[in-house]
Image: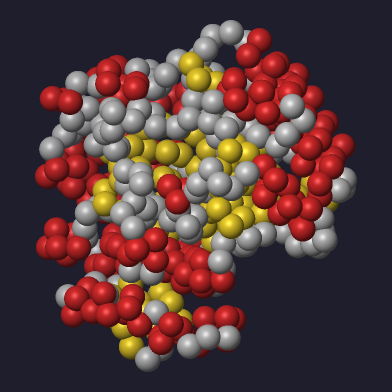
Amino acid sequence: MDSATQLVIDPDLLERFGGRGPRYTSYPTADRFHPGFTDTDYLEALQERAKRRDQPLGLYFHIPFCRTICYYCGCNKIGTKHQGKSAEYLTALEREIELVTDAIGMGQTIRHLHFGGGTPTFMLDSEFEQLFAVVRKHFVMAPDGEYSIEVDPRTVTPDRLKVLRGFGLNRISLGIQDFDADVQRAVNRIQSYEESRALIEAARAEGFESVNVDLIYGLPLQTVEGFRKTVELTIAARPDRVALYHYAHLPKLFMPQRRIDEAQLPDAATRGALFEMATELFGEAGYIHLGLDHFALADDELAVAQRENRLHRNFQGYCSHDAGDIIALGVSSISQVGAVYAQNDKTLSGYYQRLAENRLPTVRGIKLSEDDFLRRDAIQALMCGFGLDWANFDSHHQVRGREYFADALASLEAMHEAGAITIDDAGIEVEPRGRLLVRAVAMAFDRYLRESPPSGTYSKIA
């Protein structure tokens, strides 16, 4: 398969096979986690990890605090202007790290580290210094590791970026969303192009190896002409990667979204035109479609990894190789260790209380079965490489995939006949005109969807 082939937008296929579905940052998906999975189950997984010190390991820190709340945001966040909140939180993170390393042992090597939120840079530089000291005390940071942070250009100056680089961070992601002033006022995020561009240039000057920016289409007051200017300005800044997210308006789930005037949201036709225009411009500018709503320059490590069939996907997004186990720390964060997913308490009070009791703050999760592992690998192959090769899959798992997934193949026959995908003796290939439907293809392999309705609200596929 030529992974560099750009996607083709086919409205008829999207209308026929679209709908709502999981983004498959994990399989089983997070809405299948259950409270019967406890901190004891997670502790056992960590103790098992102690025997696999040579296997890849990464850390994720969730920093939930934001000084101002963007109305569109669906992340787990806490609005506050009290800086003391981060000091208390840092103490809790340190205790969680101690509990984790009591189980896995000191000195394991990490090759991935990511700070997400919320706004990670809510923490002071001195607090980052303290946290990195704790990380280096309990872990070994590989010299060639991938260490990233999400930053808010409204609060991070080029000088502060230099400090963050000094801690060892080498990749950054900037939230932009839209540069149009009317759109920014409608979503409570005022941010100039000049400050964003300055931060991108400063990141390059300081030696950050990759710069990602986030855009959102479907926001209130967006027009094709207005968003075109945002995309053109973004391309002019030349970030290595772009995430082009679709705004999901779910005010019943996310309270800040209730402050958005629904009458100002673009209709379905406009949303489609926004995405089509943006993808066309990014393609013309040399960005490769990695999958879903992510793009990267052809020489970026993610695009190279996709061409070499070693792209992976987890809760932090796409990565250039298998990140292995991910130990996630902080409120609401989700760990992936061995055969389990484990999620921390979503409330700050509950998170603090469990740590005060010297317990891991796990409140739900799931242990994977052999069937889950098979289906997860099949879904991962589709989501990251737009294909599933039977010979590779069968050799790796010692099964006959085409027979094992006979029910999935039968359900995909209509997409095959419509030309969205190709199914043959070699495997499955998602064609360029079907790539926006890759989530729908992956859903055919999801046993949980087939056996019981989803417990969560999924976003639109396209």
State the quadrant of the N terminus: bottom left
Q: How many marks?
A: 0
- From this viewpoint, which residue is outermost toward the front? 36
Please tell me in which quadrant of the rendered image residue 90 appears: top right
The picture quadrant where one finds residue 70 is top left
Q: Is residue 362 left or right of residue 11?
A: right
The residue at 57%/62% (across/down) is 368
Vertically, is 226 above or below 439?
above
Q: In percent of the image, x 36 and y 46: which residue is there?
A: 455
Closer-to-camera residue (447/414): 447
In-front residue for pair 393/355: 355
Residue 42 in the image: state x and y as whole percent.
Answer: 68, 48
What coloring was used for the rendering? secondary structure
**Residue farthest to the bottom, as pictured:** 425
Horizontal side of 362 relative to 461 (left or right) equals right
Is residue 70 visible in the rendered image? The answer is yes
Q: Position of residue 355 (x, y in %)?
A: 71, 28
Residue 61 visible (yes or no)? no
Which x, y percent locates residue 251? 28, 27
Identify which residue, 161 or 460, lies in the foreground: 460
Residue at 31% x, 54% y: name it.
453
The answer to whether 237 appears left or right of 253 in the picture is: right
Q: Residue at position x 70%, y 16% from top?
A: 87
Percent from the top left, x then y, of residue 316? 54, 47
245 to the left or right of 320: left
